[in-house]
């Protein structure tokens, strides 16, 4: 590792620590050597301190525990302020990397100074780390990665809006290419999608490799499995801002459909938790935006 590391790896954690040591080991096992690790503990309780202290190569790791919970978007912004690398890679505490991830993706970025993002496909695995092959392939299809060849993405906006790059699993990007002032609390858990969109708005190249360079873990404590009345509001914020700022004009119908779909999901979440007035508003906004008859039926039911 050089005096000033080339890559800053941000490992995010919040209360859950049962997979953190494995995530850190996967970073420390990288074939690429020029990186630092910043563990961003947003629990407000320094829960991960002992795990980090017990890791090999402590000189690589800085532990940043927030006194109060900031939310994942603000936690990442604060951690980026401490990052010394020109490249940023983000890894969730419950996921892992393959040993060649940094080597392959950093090499792709350094091959062309205009490239802002290098990303790859990834595996899905169960709680015990066993790869789920069929589900991995179906996700590659759903997120428009399946069939893509290695190289520069021909339509980066479409790739990003479709959710192609997994920013918080298998991506490395240039720190200077992101306007970090736009990563506000309202982005919340959709920060990875939002960062991808911001990188695409630069108009600079995005590089993709179909090799699966990471593993995304499915388990009962994962964030996407949590039911919460406000859970979808982060995505509503992101799609609304993309449309408001006209970032991807040619994809406006796609973004509008995604916003309507997210508003419908928001309405269902609110209704499930008995927040009827908020649910009614979400269903009404969904109906007005997309004419969804199911949203109108749910809206009427709230009365």
Image (cartoon, grey):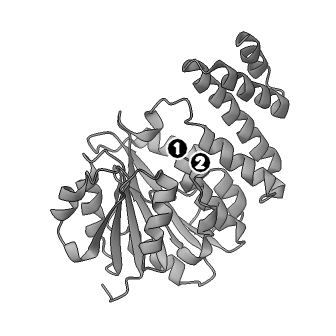
How many numbered marks does the figure carry? 2
Camera-nearest residue between 133 and 303: 303
Residue at far bottom of view: 3
Q: Can residue 146 be seen in this view?
A: no
Whole-percent x, y for residue 258 in the image:
71, 40
Q: Mark 1 points at which residue?
A: 139
Camera-nearest residue between 279 and 104: 279
Q: Is residue 121 left or right of residue 284?
A: left
Q: Is mark 1 on a helix, strand or loop?
A: helix
Q: Which residue is drawn at 46% across and 53% down?
A: 70
60 over 292 or under it: above or below: below
Residues marked 2 and 1 touching at CB (< 8 Å): yes
Cα–Cα gap, marks 2 and 1: 6 Å
Q: Is mark 2 on a helix, strand or loop?
A: loop
Mark identifier at residue 143: 2
Camera-nearest residue between 257 and 66: 66
Q: Which residue is drawn at 34% across and 51% down?
A: 44
Whole-percent x, y for residue 17 in the image:
27, 48
Q: Quadrant of the N terminus?
A: bottom left
Q: In which quarter of the image is the C terminus?
A: top right
Image quadrant of residue 66? bottom left
Image quadrant of residue 300? top right
Mark 1 neighbour density, 10 Å: few (under 14) some (14–19) many (20 or more): some
206 over 234 or under it: above or below: below
Whole-percent x, y for residue 140 in the image:
54, 48
Q: Which residue is drawn at 59% across and 48% down?
A: 143
Q: Is residue 300 visible?
A: yes
């Amino acid at each position: 590792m050089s005096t000033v590391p080339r890559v800053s790896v941000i490992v995010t954690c919040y209360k859950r620590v049962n997979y953190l040591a494995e995530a850190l080991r996967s970073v420390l096992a990288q074939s690429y050597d020029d990186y630092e690790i910043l563990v961003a503990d947003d629990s407000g309780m320094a829960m991960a301190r002992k795990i980090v202290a017990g890791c090999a190569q402590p000189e690589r790791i800085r532990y940043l525990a927030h006194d109060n919970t900031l939310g994942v978007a603000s936690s990442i912004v604060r951690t980026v302020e401490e990052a010394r690398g020109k490249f940023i890679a983000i890894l969730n505490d419950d996921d892992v990397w393959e040993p060649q991830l940094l080597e392959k993706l950093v090499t792709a970025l350094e091959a062309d100074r205009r490239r802002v993002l290098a990303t790859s496909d990834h595996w899905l695995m169960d709680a015990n780390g066993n790869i789920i092959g069929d589900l991995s392939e179906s996700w590659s299809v759903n997120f428009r990665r399946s069939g893509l060849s290695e190289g520069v993405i021909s339509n980066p906006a479409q790739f990003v809006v479709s959710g192609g790059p997994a920013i918080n699993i298998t991506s490395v990007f240039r720190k200077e290419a992101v306007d970090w002032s736009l990563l506000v609390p309202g982005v919340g858990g959709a920060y990875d999608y939002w960062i991808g969109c911001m990188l695409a708005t630069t108009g600079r190249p995005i590089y993709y490799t179909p090799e699966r360079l990471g593993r995304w873990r499915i388990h009962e404590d994962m964030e996407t499995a949590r039911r919460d009345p406000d859970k979808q509001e982060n995505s509503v914020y992101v799609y609304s801002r993309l449309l408001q700022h006209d970032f991807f004009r040619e994809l406006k119908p796609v973004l509008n459909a995604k916003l309507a779909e997210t508003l419908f999901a928001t309405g269902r979440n609110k209704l499930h938790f008995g927040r009827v007035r908020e649910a009614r508003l979400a269903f009404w906004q969904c109906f007005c935006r997309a004419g969804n008859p199911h949203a109108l039926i749910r809206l009427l039911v709230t009365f």
